[in-house]
Image (cartoon, rainbow, N blue to C red):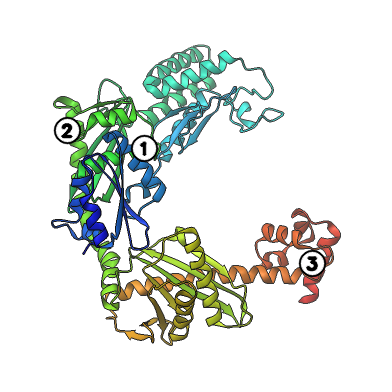
Amino acid sequence: MTSISVKQKLMLLPDQPGCYLMKNEFGKVIYVGKAKVLKNRVKSYFSGTHDGKTQRLVSEIRDFEYIVTSTEMEALVLEMNLIKKHDPRYNVMLKDDKSYPYLKVTSEKQPRLLYTRKIKKDGGKYFGPFVNAYAAQETKKLLDRIFPLRKCDTMPKRVCLYYHIGQCLGPCVYDITEQENKNMVEGIVKFLNGGYQDVKSQLSEKMLEASEALNFERAKELRDQIQYIEAVMEKQKMMTADLVDRDVFGYHFDKGWMCVQVFFIRQGKVIARDISVFPFYGEAHEDLLTFIGQFYLQKNHLLPKEILLPQEVDAELVSELLQVKVHQPKKGQKKELVELATKNATLALNEKFALIEQDEARTIKAVENLGERMGVTPPYRIEAFDNSNIHGTDPVSAMVVFVDGKPYKKDYRKYKIKSVEGPDDYASMKEVVRRRYTRVLREEGELPNLILIDGGKGQIKAAQDVLENELNLFIPVAGLAKDDKHRTSQLWLGDPPEMIHLPRNSQEFYLLQRIQDEVHRFAISFHRKVRSKSMFESTLDNIAGIGDKRKKMLLRHFGSLKKLKEASVEDIQEAGVPKPVAELITKAFLSNE
C-alpha cells in the first residue's frame, strides 16, 4: 500500500518530460527513471500488475521526487547524471565495470605507443577496442617493430635496449625531428585504420631488395615481420566492404530482463562484442536509450563513425546526445548486422534465464523468505558484525554487507577497539555499533534492513541498547549462534530474544551461513594482520636506534616478523637501516632464541 503523501503527490504530477527519483523508508534514492510524460510513467508503478521484480521495487518505495525538463534529451542526460550521483541499487546498468583494451599514440613531443583500458581527453589518438588484451598487446609488439617510437616513460640519459634492438630511435640522445615522429605516427594511424596491407607490400619490396643485396639476415627479419602481420591482423572475418568503423546494437527483453549486444566493427571486421544482461523497471526501448548513453558517455567507449540501431529506438535522440551518425537500416547488409546482434541478444538472454532464476533462489528469494520467517521487512540490505581477539589482546571487529543476498564488499568495514580493555564482547559490540551508525547518520548513508550479530542474547541486547537508546534507531537486530562444531545453528530475534526456527536445508539458512562465514573470515584476517603488526613492533621496542619510522619501514620491506628474523645484516641494511642498528636487530633475535 502506498502512503497518503505518495497518493497526493501522484495527483500533482505534470504532463511533461522529466526524471523521477524513488526513495525508500530511510530517504535513500533506490531508483532513478526518465519519462516523456511524468504523470503517466510514475503512476504506472502504483497501478496494475507487475512482475515480482518490479513489485519488490514498488514495495520499498515510500516517497518520490521529480524534476521537470524541457525536452526528452534533457531528461536523458539528467537521468544519467542522477544515476551516477546516487548510485541507486535498482539501476544496475552502471555497476558493470567492463573495459576494453585500446592502443594509444600520445600527443607528446616525442610520442609513445601505449596499451590502455582508459580513454581520456588528452589529445592522444586511440584505436580499438580490441577483442582481448592479448590481441592488443600482440598488435603493439608488431607496431613496435615497424615504427620505433620512444618507449621510456621519462627520458633516460643514455640509450636503452630498445634502441639497440631497433625498436626506438633514441630521442634521449639523438635529435629526432618533428617530421620523423610525424611520419611514424601517420604510419601507425594508417596501419590501424586498415592500411596494414600497404605496409605489408612495402616490407615485401624491402625484403626482396635485401635478398638481392645478399643481406639475408635483414631479409629474414622483414619476412618475420610480414608473417607477424598476417598472424595478428588477418584473423577476423570481413563483415562489410566499406571499412567504416561502426557499432551495431541489438537487444531482447523478457520477464523484466534485458540483454544488449554490441558488435564493434572496425575496418570491416567484427573485432569484439559487448554483452550486458540486466533487470529493467521501465519501458524497454527507453531503458535501452539510457544504456547507450551510459555506454559511451560514462563507460567511455570510443565513439565510432556510425551507430546502427533497431527500428523502435529513438535514433534522433541518440544522434543528438552523442553527436554521431546513427542509422536504422531497413534493408541490405546493415539490416542483417542489426538482426544478427538481436539474434545473439535473444540467445544470450535465454541462456541466462536458468542461471538468473538459480541465482535469485539463492539470493533475493532467500532474503524475502528470511524476512517472512522473521516477521520483518525483507532485509535486502544486511550488515553483520563479528568481534575477534585472543585473550583480550589486539581486539578488533569487522562488518560485512550483503545486498540482495550477495556480498557488497565496497561497504565492508574494519574497526580497532579503542575504548574497551580486556576481553569484553558486549562493550566491544556497543562501541562498534555506536561508531558505525553514528557515522551513517552523520553522512546520511544507507541504513540496513537487518543487523546480524555473531553471538547470542547478550550481544543482541548490547547492540539494541546503543541503537534505540542512544541513536533512536529501530532496526531489527538478530544474533547468530554457533554449535560446538562452530557451525551456524540458531537465529535469535526480538526483545527478549526468541529463537527463529529455519529449516536446515532452506536457502535462507544457507544465506545466513554464508554471511556468518564471511564476517568471521573478514574479522579473523583483520585480527591476524593487526596482531602480526603489534608483535612486529613490540619485538623492536627495546632496540636502540629503532623508532616508529623505522618500524614502519621494516614492516613495509619485510612484511612479517618471521621474514625479518630470517634476514641477514646485509638484508636489513637494504631496507634503509644503518649497519650498527642492523647488527643490533640480528643480535636481539639471536638472544631471544
Residue 131: numbered disc: 1
Q: Nearer the viewer, residue 106 or 479?
A: 479
Image: 447 above or below 259: below
Residue 459: numbered disc: none
Check disc 2 and report the residue beneath it. Answer: 311
- Residue 153 rendering spot, x and y as whole percentages: 61, 33
Instruction: Select label 2 or label 1 by which is in front.
Output: 2
- Marks 3 and 2: in contact by CB < 8 Å? no
Mark 3 or mark 1: which comes first in sequence? 1
Q: Can residue 131 be seen in this view?
A: yes
Q: Which residue is drawn at 23% across and 56% down?
A: 8
Residue at mark 2 to residue at mark 3: CA–CA distance: 76 Å
Badge 1 crowding class, 10 Å Cα cut-off, few under 14, some 14 to 19, many 20 or more, is some
Tell me the amino acid under the disc marked 3.
Answer: Thr
Mark 2 or mark 1: which comes first in sequence? 1
Mark 2 or mark 3: which comes first in sequence? 2
**Image quadrant in which the C terminus is located:** bottom right
Tell me the amino acid under the disc marked 2.
Answer: Gln
Q: Farthest right residue?
A: 580
